[in-house]
Image (cartoon, rainbow, N blue to C red):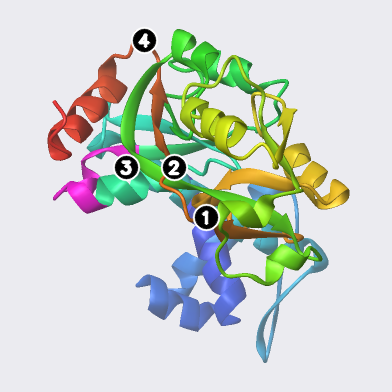
Amino acid sequence: MYDRHLLTFIQVAESGSLSRSAERLYLTPAAVMKHMNALESSLGVKLIIRSNQGVELTEAGRYIYTEAKRLVEECNGIVHEARALQRHSGRTIRVGSSFLNPGQALLDIWNRVNPQPGNFNVKIVPYSDDRAQILSVVKSLGTKLDFMVGVFGSRRMHELAGFFELGTYELCVAVPGGHPLAKKSRLDIIDMYGESLIIVREGDETNLGSLRETLRREHPQIRLVETDYFYDMETFNESALTGSLLLTFDVWKNVHPALVTLPVNWDFTSPYGLLYSRNISGAAGEFLAALREAMGKK
């Protein structure tokens, strides 16, 4: 993909000698010099100066050498990717990844349950958790990306996409670092009496109805503060800035440095899994079928 004269020049620049370059390239010194003359002639630039001590690069030669090295590395990378695509032709899946819902969660499960994890080529596609944009990301499934992995307990999301459950996350409570409860290793529900607990607004979510009803009926001493249907970083900032507690998941324990995520003595969990296009096909469809089979969920 690059001129053989350029490769000869790189070797001359790195060895500092025509004779040493000739040895490494299995050429004669005269052949090496012929390559150099041809390259300088085609570029119209003087690249080397010969002396009794060997070969020195001109200022232009040093610049050409630096850029030529970069060009060769890029070309080698292109060839490597092309060969990889050929090996996995038609078997590339695009996995969405965000700060709250990293794509690594899917890859960890796939590598654990599949004896040949390399039979699909995975491309990670970053996206934003921004609550104002997240439904647009879901709508893009099948065009810009194939899968999103995380806690997607939204009716609107499930109307737009298919959902395959992978497991469950434990519902926890995040506490601002300066809060007295932050010193505890685990919470009882009564520890939250007199506190405000930020929770997803009622109406769209599918997984929190039982918890919400239990808190309202049996623990009215906890003030429920409803927030947007979709969490993003502003949700965690709200908790940190107002001193309110925040309903969250064990998997999000390191999301915000000013919050301490604590388990609670209750039995509430929430499923997490994959969102995918309802018209899934091709490599993505094959991957989903293989994942279902590997997990025994045909």
What kind of residue is marked 4?
A: Arg
Q: Nearer the viewer, residue 282 or 127?
A: 127
Label placed on residue 278: 4
> 24 left or right of 287?
right
What kind of residue is marked 3?
A: Ala
Give the label, 4 or 3, closer to the camera: 4
Q: Nearer the viewer, residue 67 or 108?
A: 108
In primary-sequence order, the first of circles 2 and 3 is 3
Q: Which residue is mark 3?
A: 84
In primary-sequence order, the first of circles 1 and 3 is 3
Give the label, 2 or 3, closer to the camera: 2
What kind of residue is marked 2?
A: Phe
What is the magenta range?
A: 112-121
Q: Are marks 1 and 2 in contact (CB under 8 Å)?
A: yes
For image coordinates 55% across by 56% down, the residue present is 6
Q: Which residue is mark 2?
A: 268
Residue 118 lies within the magenta run: yes
What kind of residue is marked 1?
A: Val
Q: Position of residue 271 (x, y in %)?
A: 39, 35
Q: Position of residue 23 (x, y in %)?
A: 40, 80
224 above or below 81?
above
Residue 230 makes an appearance in the image: yes
In primary-sequence order, the first of circles 4 and 3 is 3
Could you give the CA–CA distance between mark 1 and mark 4, rounded to whole angstroms? 36 Å
Which quadrant is the N terminus positioned in?
top left
Q: Which residue is mark 1?
A: 264
Q: What element does badge 4 sit on?
A: loop
Q: Position of residue 152 (x, y in %)?
A: 49, 28
Q: What element does badge 3 sit on?
A: helix
